[in-house]
Amino acid sequence: MVAAQDGHGGAYRRLLGEMSEWLTRYFQRRLPPGDVDDAVQETLLAVHRRRHTYDPQYPLGPWLAAIAKNKWIDQLRSLARRPMDELPDDMAVGDHEASVVSSSVLASLLDELRPAQAQAILLVKLQGYSIEDASGQTGLSPSAVKMNIHRGLARLTAIIEKIHDVE
Amino acid sequence: MSNESLIADLSSDLTPVQRRSMLREGGLVLALGAAELMLFLSLGAMRPDMSHMAGSPFLMWRVGSLGLLAAIACVLAIRSFSPTAQPRRGLMLACALAVAAIVGGVFVTPDGASERALLDRIDPASGIMCATSIFVLSLPIVALLGALMRRAAPTQPRLSALASGIAAGACGAFVFAFCCPFNDPLYVVVWYTTGCAAVTAVARWCLPRRFRL
């Protein structure tokens, strides 16, 4: 990183490559699979924009982890803002997220929420169910499911901001 | 765009960057605060009985506690701009220090002050002027801390903005403490806190807006 701060492009390229691998593993445990690449690239851009803030007196790992955590929270916020309309049946590509729940850290953090909020987030945001399907499974109205998702994700980001790190 | 092509884009034509230095940033804030104090005093704003009051416990409490709070709050605010910082602890420390300073005011209350009516002691007409002056004096420091914050990498910008607001408010109150003619700790606590709270609210609202790492 010191070489990169001094303008050494080759060293910077190698560094970003290693960071990219680490970030992919980091976000795979924390976000739905479809959001991992976005989060990695957002973090790499942030590292690039803020590379002057790295102090060589301290290790690079915590500096990168702090930026990655910030981007994780940003992604969770964008997850909350994303429209929750049902996908049309004639869409060319089927939903592949429903079968994969690799965001293990996120899933474990759901224990911190009220059960109704955790269930709504798990069904809609992690397993890919539509609002109507989640409403049928939970017995709540669609607007109550949406409200639980919105409030649950807001609470989740507040929890993550307060704690130092999550594994 | 794949990660590989993004990395290739970012690493091509890489220019050297000047590393962030907290010492340099602290020096900038100190220089601005000192310039503001010098300008303010050179305009003849210092209280006329300063030479007579300089050794009084009340003035020592007011100037000393505000100076200490301003210095510590500025350090905490600048430290909070680092990605690995934990601004929550710094904020707790600044708040604890402010509470300790307020409690200290009890011991420097002039004789007879506690016998006066509450409204007479607080003197809202003058108090609003004091709070407004502190607010105005704090604005340059808020602007500077805001610029430093946006150039750095605070991972909790809202807390960093709060810390910046407290630091700027304490700096403004410190400068104003040299000209305020009132000698009642209750007056100081009420109106200086109001001025600082207003600056902190503005900083909390404005500084993190549209900020992204």
Image (cartoon, helix red, strand yellow):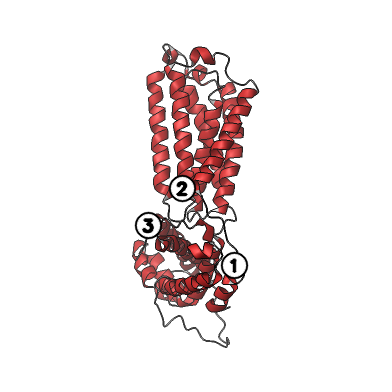
What residue did someone put label 3 on? Answer: A164
Whole-percent x and y of residue B206?
59, 47
Residue B101 visible (yes or no): yes
Crowding around mark 2 (Cα neighbors within 10 Å: few <14, some 14 to 19, many 20+) is many
Q: Earlier in the sequence, mark 1 or mark 2?
A: 1
- Pointer 3 and pointer 1 on the same chain: no
The kind of residue on which mark 3 rests is His
Front: mark 3 or 1: 1
- At a point 55% along the width and 32% down the height, the residue shown is B172
Whole-percent x and y of residue B89?
39, 46
Quarter of the image that includes the N terminus of chain B: bottom right
Give the side of residue B61 with respect to residue A12, left or right: left
Give the side of residue B210 with respect to residue B184, left or right: right
Which chain is home to disc 1? B
Which chain is home to disc 2? B
Relative height, residue B192 to residue A30 (above, below) = above
Q: Which mark is residue B79?
A: 2
The kind of residue on which mark 1 rests is Leu
Looking at the picture, tell me which residue is in the foreground, A136 or A36.
Answer: A36
Secondary structure beneath dot 3 equals: loop
Secondary structure beneath dot 1 equals: loop
Inter-mark Cα distance, 3 to 2: 16 Å
Which chain is home to disc 3? A
Secondary structure beneath dot 2 equals: helix
Inter-mark Cα distance, 1 to 2: 27 Å
What residue did someone put label 1 on? Answer: B14
- At a point 47% along the width and 84% down the height, the residue shown is A96
Quarter of the image that includes the C terminus of chain B: bottom right
